[in-house]
Image (cartoon, grey):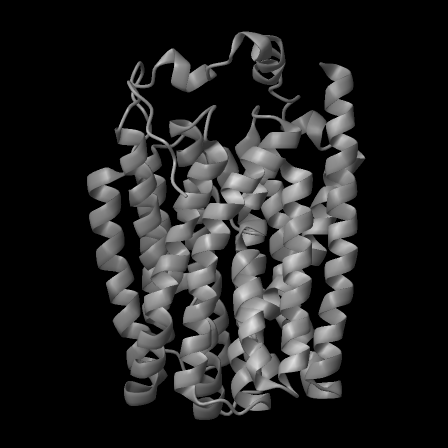
Amino acid sequence: MALKIEKGSNKRKYIMIFICMLIQAIPFSVAQNIQPLFIPYVIKKFDFSLAAFSLIFTFGSLASAACSPFLGKLFGKVNIKILFLVGSILSSLAFVGFGFSHHLLQFYLFSALAQIGCVIFSGLGIAYLIGAWFPKKGRGEALGLAFAGGSIGNVFLQPLVSSILGSKGPDKTYIIFGIASLVASLILVLLFIRTPKPGELSDEEINGKAEDKDKEKEKKEEGFQGVGAALTRKNKFFWLFGIGYAFIGVAIAACSTQYASYFKLQLHLSPSLIGILGSVFAFFCLFGNIGGGALFDKLGSFKAMFIAFILQGLAIIGMLISRFIPEFSFMFSVCYGLCVFSYMSGPAFITSDIFGKKESSVNLGTVSLMFAIGFALGSTIFGMFAEMIGFNIAWIAMIVFLVLGYFLLLTSIKKVKKQNQSLQ
């Protein structure tokens, strides 16, 4: 599915989607998607425990979480090109730093720096950039397409990284991909990244176009800008929404960071098959990102996230069954790939959708903080459960976190929507 390019629209904004896809495909995928493949190799080389090395995700997520609210305030005040440069360079050089690390503290430090950089140019940066180019119509699909770049890059990176890891080891592989990320980032950001110039977007692109019978409804939607970050923080459902995303983040962390360890250490799958499973996951992430954007636009936040809940639940069930029937590991790859929109474009879309456009970057920074705290704890919680009582109990615990998280999140969406209707 692709956005329909309407007559008279500014083609530059569609080019910007493509640039965002490339940024997600290379620097984002390097910083965020391939690290789990290194885990078995690093813990074997340095004799780290799974739980101890998994703390790199905790430190990385906590660092980005702590910085997100502050970083969210910079967008709109600091030149977008500078922010993207700082974020992508920091992330890429930190990944190179992994190749020179020998102690856990070094891995923790570089993970923190990489994730701070990543949240600048991706989690906050791309959400802000797409919002600037698509202020009204098609924002959900545009976000889905932009974030789909990470899935496209992952399709190719998973088998490539697995192959290079097997032949060159983790140190050289870290350096190779860190440099590749840096080069790609500099080219893309310096040449292409910018926000629309004054008057570059038409009134129709900014305000949308409504049919006569929908004008009154459209006018109400345009008028809803939210109450700003300060008043939004006084809404209890904003915090329940964030806590829900934190619980969901625990389960997402386990699925995102521990799948390679589970496949290798528990199922004893070959590196080539693990690479294939990673590519299948990445391939369906492509459909998940694009389709998820369309779901948000057509069904709204509540129904789209309910579908994501079902998909992620099936993914974890697939992991449980794969211990007895290894072929079910593909069920995990497919379902988890399809639900990727829940944590990629989801936070940006839903935060703006239900809490308004006013200071949406600041609100998104707070939500990102909550999600990142859950993600930070998730990998460590899963690693501890896996080492102490086994992988099966660890996956069941993730289902519990998932149910609690989606209950809070979906309830909050429903309640805030009702509040918004009473204000309009």
- Front-lying residue, 390 or 179: 390
On-image quarter of the N terminus: top left
Instruction: Give the image quarter of residue 405.
Output: bottom right
Q: Position of residue 411 (x, y in %)?
A: 79, 42
Q: Residue at x 30, y 43 (%)?
A: 18
275 and 72: which is toward the camera: 275
Q: Is residue 399 visible?
A: yes
Position of residue 53 measured from the top left corner of the image (x, y, whole percent): 54, 79
Whole-percent x, y for residue 400 in the image? 78, 65
Tell me the quadrant of the picture where the C terminus can be found: top right
Relative depth, front residue between 382 and 103: 382
Residue displayed at 54% across by 50% down: 341
Where residue 146 appears, x then y in whole percent? 39, 45
Q: Looking at the picture, does residue 119 appear above or below residue 127?
A: below
Residue 326 falls in image quadrant:
bottom right
Using the image, determine if residue 227 lies above or below residue 411.
Answer: above
195 w.r.t. 179: above or below: above
Tell me if residue 106 can be seen.
no
Report how many numbered discs are placed on residues in the image. Answer: 0
Residue drawn at x 34%, y 40% is 17
Instruction: Left or right? Give the position of 10 relative to 127.
Output: left
